[in-house]
Amino acid sequence: MSGPSPRPDRPRAPRPPRPRPAGRPAGGEQLRLTNHRPRLRLIGIGLTLVTLVFTVRLVQVQVVDAASYTEQAVVNRYLTLPIAARRGDITDRNGTSLATTVDAYDIVADPSLFTTGQTGVPDAPRQAAALLAPILGEDEDRLAELLDNPDSQYALLARQQTPQAWRQILDLRGALAERSRQGTGHQVLTGVFREKNPRRVYPGGELAAALLGFVNAEGDGAGGLEAILNPQLAGRDGTIRYAQSGGRRVPTAGSSEQPAEPGTDIELTIDRDIQWAAAAAIARQVEDSAADGGYVIVQDVRSGEILAMASAPGFDPNRYGVTEPALLGNPALQDAYEPGSTSKLVSMAAVLEEGVATPETHVTVPGRLPRAGRAFFDDHDHDTYHLTLAGVMARSSNIGTILATERLGETQEEANEVLHAYLRAFGFGRPTGLGFPGETAGILAPPGKWDSAQQYTIPFGQGVSVNALQATGVFSTVANGGERITPSVVRGTVGPDGRWEAAPKPERERVIGEDTARRLTEMLETVVVDEDWGTGHAARIPGYRVAGKTGTSNRVDPETGRYNGYTASFAGFAPADEPRVTVYCAIQNPTGEQYYGGQLCGPVFREVMTFALKALSVPPSGEEPRGLPTTFDPGE
């Protein structure tokens, strides 16, 4: 039996190579992992070493060098600094700035940053002082003493420096830092900082300085309206707290801030242009008459608003520190003096209002008037005058005024009581209502305390004292038809929110009737226009009717308490037919050839009144004044 035949040999096709498993070496060798224990042992040793390093360092910081790092912590700390509030502006009635605030900085330092350890310089305080002194305008020794106090963390080097001064310090500090990096110098100004402390400036210099006052180095109102209105003007300071390191602020450490609240802006009743005219006129006349001083007040008779209050000599509130302390007040409100003949207007008002005389009443005026054991006389010797009451006013007769006021009562005591009541009603012996610091209420004794001389001198303005605003108010009351308005100097305020708020309306008080005020106005016009008897010719203003009164009184010397020299004055209003403005002028102790009120203050009145009428666009008078008779024929 035979088996199958063998197959013939045939060539076989090559098989594709199989992929080698990853990690298996060629030639059939298998990959073997190394022992992991040595590597873990190496990592453990490394971690142990790192932990040991941190432990050693921690022991060094907390135990070995604790005192050193505590000292450095003082350098790297949080600071809390004040943020000065912006003080409110003071403007005139038209918004012109009279007092404003500009950016300024207090330059301060941290003396602990000026030690040898911090700066690497043994005399860092002295070097820093030498660099800062010319910039700050301060004494080098003083600065060095302030900086050489390592136990202190705050020193005030200079107040209210300009932004330019701070920029100079920054530039200098930057230059020192660059030298320190280059190894050619040391940084000794790291511990110098700034604090905002805005500076008060007065653009007009001396303009209205006596009224405005000034702000002291601490930023508080220290005189005038700056002091009165300080709570509104000052605002409320804020604070800022931030981290600093080595004298530099750390921006990533965060900060907290309580913003400052700005002060309120104050708008005054003052007109800057009229104030300027008044200041120029009084300053010139005080100088020309070689007087101790003088003042001018301009008042709106319809509202009681003060349009100008100027005095001479004055001061610059921007430089109050170099001014004599005696000049820093407001003499128009603080000086008490005997008004003289301008106060005869009150005596005449009492006589007319009480109905005991009229402007045409006959008054026989002798050259001497014996009363209370003495003789009273006018400013010059004369024979007997035959004057009307209007003529007594025009001629400014002391004797005629005494005779007229004696009619106020059955007895002299009763007459004194009546006159005293009118003086009080017109504002004598009581505050004006402005509330100005240091303002005097004047002196008006009760009638029961008038001595034998005063009961006859007070009617013509001696033996009683006033301030200039009180004297002004008498004429404004008559000009306003007999109604007295409390004077005001603040027109309104603008708060931090920008809202305008008008000042409260002033109080009004009826003093005399309108008919009495009208007749008094006619008598005052006679003072100015009467060619023969009037003493106020110098106050005439072409195109306007003027009502006014001269005054020349004996002056009490404040040093001796005795009469020495004179007070010259003039008061009046215009237009007399439609009163709008009152101007009052007084000059103390003129030592030139002229000393009468009409001679010295009449021209000042005319100059200031003319300017005010034009500034306020007051139209000229429509008709000429009706002249009152000033004399009478005794034979008729």
Image (tube, rainbow, N blue to C red):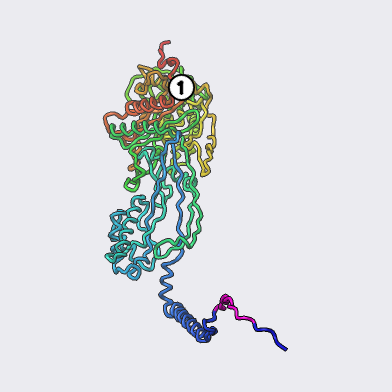
Q: Could you tell me which secondary element the residue under label 1 belongs to? A: helix
The residue sitting at 45% across, 36% down in the picture is 95
Extreme residue toward the right, this view: 1
Nearest to the observer: residue 406 or residue 425: 425
Nearest to the observer: residue 273 or residue 360: 273
The stretch in magenta equals 7-22
For residue 60, which quarter of the picture?
Answer: bottom left
Quarter of the C terminus within the rendering: top left
Q: What residue type is labelled 1?
A: Thr
Extreme residue toward the front, this view: 1
Magenta span main SS: loop
Please tell me how crowded label 1 is: few (under 14), some (14-19), or many (20+) other residues with Cα within 10 Å: many
Q: Can residue 370 be seen in this view?
A: no
Nearest to the observer: residue 247 or residue 234: 247
The residue sitting at 43% across, 70% down in the picture is 73
Nearest to the observer: residue 17 or residue 101: 17
Q: Can residue 530 be seen in this view?
A: yes
Quarter of the N terminus within the rendering: bottom right
- Residue 19 screen position, x and y as percent: 57, 76
Residue 77 drawn in magenta: no
The residue sitting at 39% across, 31% down in the picture is 273
- Residue 285 screen position, x and y as percent: 31, 31
Q: How many numbered markers are drawn?
A: 1
Residue at numbered disc 1:
521
Q: Is residue 575 left or right of residue 514?
A: left
- Residue 26 screen position, x and y as percent: 52, 81
- Residue 197 screen position, x and y as percent: 41, 52
